[in-house]
Image: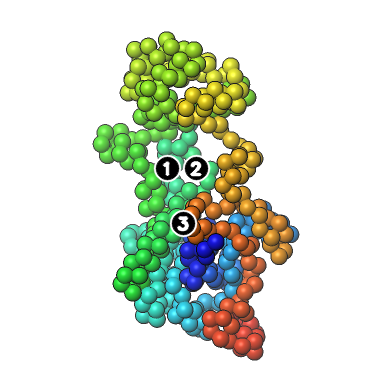
Amino acid sequence: MSSKPLKDLVVLDMTRVLAGPYTGMILADMGADVLKIEAPGKGDDARAFGPFVNGESTYYMSLNRDKRSMTLNLKAPEGKEILKALVKKADVLLENFRGGTMEKLGLGYDVLKEINPRLVYSSCTGFGMTGPYKHDPAYDVIVQGMGGIMSITGQENGEPTRVGASIGDITAGLFSAIGVMIALYNRDRTEKGQLVDVSMLDGQVAILENAIARYLNTGIVPKPIGNRHPSITPFESFKTSDGYVIIAIGNDTLWQKFCKLVDRPDLGADPRFTTNPLRTDNQKALKEELEKIFVNKSTDEWLHIIKDAGIPVGPINTVDRVMKDPSVIAHDMIVTTHHPVAGEVKMAGVPIKLSDTPGSVDGPAPTLGQHTREILKQFLSYDDSKIDELYKDHVL
């Protein structure tokens, strides 16, 4: 097997909690040597988030696998100098501090690019490095609210609802990883690094997709409509005898096929439902008819009947069922790592499948400062006495 595609890429990961560590995890999965720079004593805030196994955070472990951890006091002058020395050896630096923090430390992009002009510096913040909110703090739920996605999530006439996964953080982490790779590609042509500036709020606006199109072209403000699609019908979930099933009928041919399949050709001939625009206009009436049909069989029965006919269909799985899904298992999307303290820990696998240089999860998340000594020896040629002195002076 060929080596991983990002082998030999050195990444300084100064991020905490979720958005930034998610970016570093993607790069680590693909072979980058990700050096997790953490504050002495406490480390990444996520180390204090449960659930815990033998005192170690599984939340932290799920986002920092395959990284090496070193502690560094960035408030100490010598700590700053060590970081600058590491920057000379690095390809990428990731940070997601509150806007302006790195500048206050004297470690902003303008300073570090002079030390290493080839450095790709990725800043992932709540609101970006420019604009009226650039110094404001943010968490996932804040940008979900501000970015509009909560206003279109939930049941019809219900309260605005947070998306169950931390999509504000994860989207920002994904965009940061994409930005880093684009900047590295450009560096191959120009020999110059650059700043990658990703705003969590911008990420939420970017994924509003049809909600933006609807509002800008009709003037109608989108609202929550439950599990259905605003312009494709039927495209939603229905209660079965033992759970829920989702159908997605995206054209009139599939609709006619479905009506015959469930022994309701009358629905296919009903003038209210013959075309997708008509079905969407009459969605409530159609839903009442379909609810009477789906409740008569189990979810598995409907999956068998509808899937065999080539119509898009799926269950609403609980998380435990997702873990047992044969496709999830076949794609190695649940992996096991062996942590030195927590022992065997399971987590999500790598979703990007490459044919020749695949990524993989090869090691656990590090304990706090686990690799400090080896990193300083490898990159800065420090000896044990020098490192011992730095520990004594609380630099590490």
Q: Earlier in the sequence, mark 1 or mark 3?
A: 1
Residue at mark 3 to residue at mark 2: CA–CA distance: 16 Å
Which residue does the numbered mark 3 point to in the structure image? Answer: 173
Is residue 60 in view?
Answer: no
Give how far across and how far down residue 363 sits, in percent. Answer: 63, 63
Q: Is residue 154 left or right of residue 383?
A: left
Q: Nearer the viewer, residue 52 or 251?
A: 251
10 Å crowding of disc 3: few (<14), some (14-19), many (20+):
many
Label 1 sits on residue:
149
* Residue with the most extreme left position: 217
The disc, 3 or 2, on the residue closer to the chain's N-terminal end is 2
Q: Are marks 2 and 1 in contact (CB under 8 Å)?
A: yes
Of badges 1 and 3, the one in the foreground is 3
Residue 377 can be seen in this image: yes
Query: Label 3's element?
Result: helix
Residue at 58% from the left image edge and 61% from the top image edge: 64
Q: Which residue is under mark 2? A: 163
Task: Bin the neighbour count of mark 1 within 10 Å (Cα to Cα): few under 14, some 14-19, many 20 and up.
Answer: many
Dot 2 falls on a residue whose secondary structure is loop
